[in-house]
Image (cartoon, rainbow, N blue to C red):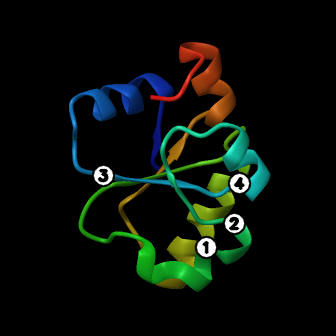
Amino acid sequence: MNSITALALKQKINSAEDFQLIDVREAFEHDDFNIGGEWIPLNEITLQIERIATDKPVIIYCRKGLRSQIAIQRLQEKCHFTNLFNLIGGTEAWQKQFGVKS
């Protein structure tokens, strides 16, 4: 499984690289703190495949990195995505390193 660190994601954001960022946490978590990702909860990820880009990197995140791993596994199994990346440590790693939204 491809992965990315919070620092590498921050660099992509700062350099305005073309990628999609998806938050698979619950609504209350997304509303409380997010790093700018589109919200597609884990339980709906395979139902909303049409929202997920196939022509650029897609970085998926959750709070610690486990739910995003599950989302990636489901998408790879169902649709054979090859452009998915898991944010290592999720929003907890992001907040530890940067404290705030991008």
Q: Locate residue 38 relative to residue 69 in the image: left or right.
A: left
Amino acid, disc 1 = Ile
Tell me whether the residue at label 1 lies in contact with that at label 2, contact meaning CB atoms closer than 8 angstroms: yes
Determine crowd level at label 1: few under 14, some 14-19, many 20+ residues with C-alpha closer than 10 A: many
**Residue at the outermost front position:** 31
Q: Bin the neighbour count of mark 2 within 10 Å (Cα to Cα): few under 14, some 14-19, many 20 and up.
A: some
Task: Decide: few, some or many residues near mark 4? Use Cα within 10 Å; few <14, some 14-19, many ≥20.
Answer: many
Please tell me which of labels 2 and 3 falls first in the chain. 3
Asked if marks 4 and 2 touch (Cβ < 8 Å), the reply is yes
Above or below, 54 relative to 87: below
- Indicate the amino acid at tag 2: Leu
Q: Label 2 belongs to which residue? A: 42
Tell me the distance, in whole angstroms, between the alpha carbons under discs 4 and 1.
11 Å
Write down the residue under mark 4: 25
| Tag of residue 19 | 3
Q: Earlier in the sequence, mark 4 or mark 1?
A: 4
